[in-house]
């Protein structure tokens, strides 16, 4: 019984750490780093720098998504799956999918358009860049929301498991 509880706590800790790295990275890059870089560094160097930062962070986000997927697989072995667990899984699957869309499609497309000399809203390439960038922003915001929901539901799920009858 103590061993099972220790495993549940360890799995939750790994999951929370991965979620913190992932969500924290999105928030810091979007709310702090990008505005400073775009304010202090002239174009196109600012765009090139942030493209490199986001391409690198996408690897962190996708790795965090995989870690959380593995912890969720482990959690499924700890007991019955409840509604809160299904909601938690739906939120993390949403974030997982968005991390991979961002990392495998959107960020590389933005990088490609920058390489081709695109400037947002200037010419055909600039319009493509603007559209892709807007999708990327929406993806990041939705991913963040899904991760917040995941953390809240994971805490709720852990609290319910902690207060479950001992024979369950």
Image (cartoon, rainbow, N blue to C red):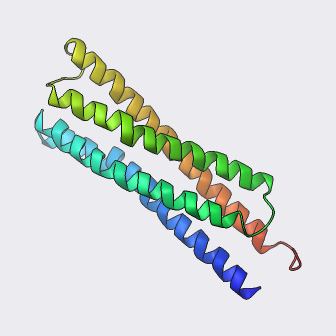
Q: Which residue corresponds to the image point at 64% horizontal and 78% vertical from the top-left?
A: 7
Q: Tell me where residue 77 sits by quadrant.
A: bottom right
Q: Quadrant of residue 132?
A: top left
100 in relation to 16, above or below: above
Q: Position of residue 136 (x, y in %)?
A: 39, 33
Left or right? Give the position of 118 relative to 7: left
The residue sitting at 48% across, 62% down in the picture is 18
Q: Is residue 103 visible?
A: yes
Percent of width and height locating residue 24: 42, 56
What is the number of callouts on the image? 0
Which quadrant of the rendered structure holds the N terminus?
A: bottom right
Residue 4 lies, in percent from the top left, at 71, 80
Q: Quadrant of the C terminus?
A: bottom right
Q: Is residue 19 visible?
A: no
Q: Nearer the viewer, residue 2 or 47?
A: 2
Residue in front for this viewpoint, 69 or 156: 69
- Residue shown at the point (73%, 55%) measured from the top left: 85
Relative to 68, 76 lies left or right: right
Relative side of 102 to 65, left or right: left
Q: Image quadrant of residue 74? A: bottom right
- Indicate the position of residue 146 as horizontal and vertical percent values: 57, 45
In this rendering, the answer to whether 14 lies above or below 106 is below
What residue occupies the far top of the structure in this picture?
Answer: 123
The residue shown at (50%, 61%) is: 67
């Amino acid at each position: 019984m103590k061993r099972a509880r220790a495993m549940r706590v360890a799995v939750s800790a790994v999951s929370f750490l991965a979620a913190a790295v992932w969500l924290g990275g999105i928030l810091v890059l979007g709310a702090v780093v990008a505005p400073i870089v775009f304010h202090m560094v002239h174009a196109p160097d600012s765009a090139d720098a942030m493209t490199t930062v986001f391409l690198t962070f996408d690897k962190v986000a996708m790795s965090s998504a995989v870690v959380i997927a593995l912890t969720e697989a482990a959690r499924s072995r700890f007991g019955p799956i409840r509604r809160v667990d299904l909601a938690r899984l739906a939120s993390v699957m949403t974030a997982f999918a968005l991390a991979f869309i961002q990392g495998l499609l959107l960020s590389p497309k933005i990088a490609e358009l920058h390489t081709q000399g695109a400037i947002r809203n200037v010419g055909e390439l600039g319009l493509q860049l603007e559209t892709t960038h807007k999708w990327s922003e929406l993806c990041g915001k939705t991913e963040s929301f899904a991760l917040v929901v995941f953390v809240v539901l994971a805490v709720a799920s852990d609290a319910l498991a902690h207060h479950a009858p001992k024979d369950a």
